Image (spheres, rainbow, N blue to C red):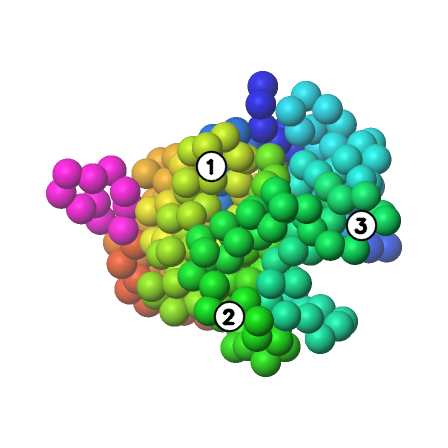
Amino acid sequence: MSGLIVRGVEVRVGDRALVSDAAFTTRAGQVTALIGPNGAGKTTLLAALLGLRRLTAGTVEFDGRDFAALPFAERAKLCAYVEQDAGTPERLTVRDVVALGRIPFQSTWRTTLPADDETIVAGALEALNLMNFANRLYHTLSGGEQQRVQMARALAQEPQLLLLDEPTSHLDIEAQLLALDLLQDRARAGCTVLLAMHDLNLAARYADHLVVMKVGRVVAEGPPAEVLTEKLLLDVYGVHATILTAPGSEVPVVIYDRAQSGRRLAKSG
């Protein structure tokens, strides 16, 4: 089956399990949203899928191949990753940062981008409304602008697998919708898209499939209309809420009521 298959993934630090027995499937052509409260293990799981955190158990398969066993150069051609807060060690222009997405496809001796790569970079800049920023220094941009640049860099990589950690966290409403529309379009074109999100209503609107995590474990998965229930929100998030459905739509809308009394804020991580 085409897509990402996660089986029994575990990540440990000493005796502490950060992720335990995580298993789910992310199909090509769909957007899958990884949701859960702070400290649920979403970022750790994404890093483990990429090979940035060592698996202590389990397997990660992409398009029928052991993803972790692939050479790094081949993985870089297949997969792009957008972190929640990403920077660059050098003072690069926006265009230069986006062009980093083409590095896996270039010969080491090249000093300039091939014409085809120039076209791809320009298309990624345009897709995120960044053409007017192309010559700006990346480090001078706001957090939301930097996030859009990192998404453009990922798009320039033309990945088959796209992983994103809170890609809308620094964006205003218009930019959030633009970015998620773009990710949905990439998925419909055949890309496998997995993103961690906090906004449940945006997740319900744009994701075909939800994977819910709590304390390092996957506790539910499926279509938003099936997964987002009042009981799940109380059990996982500790909040009372009402789930509505807009007329003529199957997309659930979460209306928050109040937090469960006696609950303490979870630690970030």
- Judging by the rendered image, the residue that carries numbered circle 1 is 187
Q: Nearer the viewer, residue 106 or 43?
A: 106
Classify mark 3: helix, strand or loop: loop
Rendered position, 148 above or below 154: below
Residue visible at 58% across and 19% down in the picture:
1
Q: Earlier in the sequence, mark 3 or mark 1?
A: 3
Asked whether 249 falls inside the magenta stretch, the response is: yes
The image's mark for residue 110 is 3
Q: Is residue 3 left or right of residue 245?
A: right
Residue range in magenta is: 244-253
Q: Position of residue 237 (x, y in %)?
A: 46, 57
Rendered position, 132 above or below 204: below
Q: Position of residue 78 (x, y in %)?
A: 67, 36
Tell which residue pokes out farthest to the bottom in this image.
Answer: 140
Q: Main secondary structure of the magenta part?
A: loop
Q: Is residue 132 left or right of residue 13?
A: left
Can you tell which of label 3 and label 1 is closer to the viewer?
A: 3
- Judging by the rendered image, the residue that carries numbered circle 2 is 133
Q: How many residues crowd mark 1 within 10 Å: few (<14), some (14–19), many (20+)?
A: many
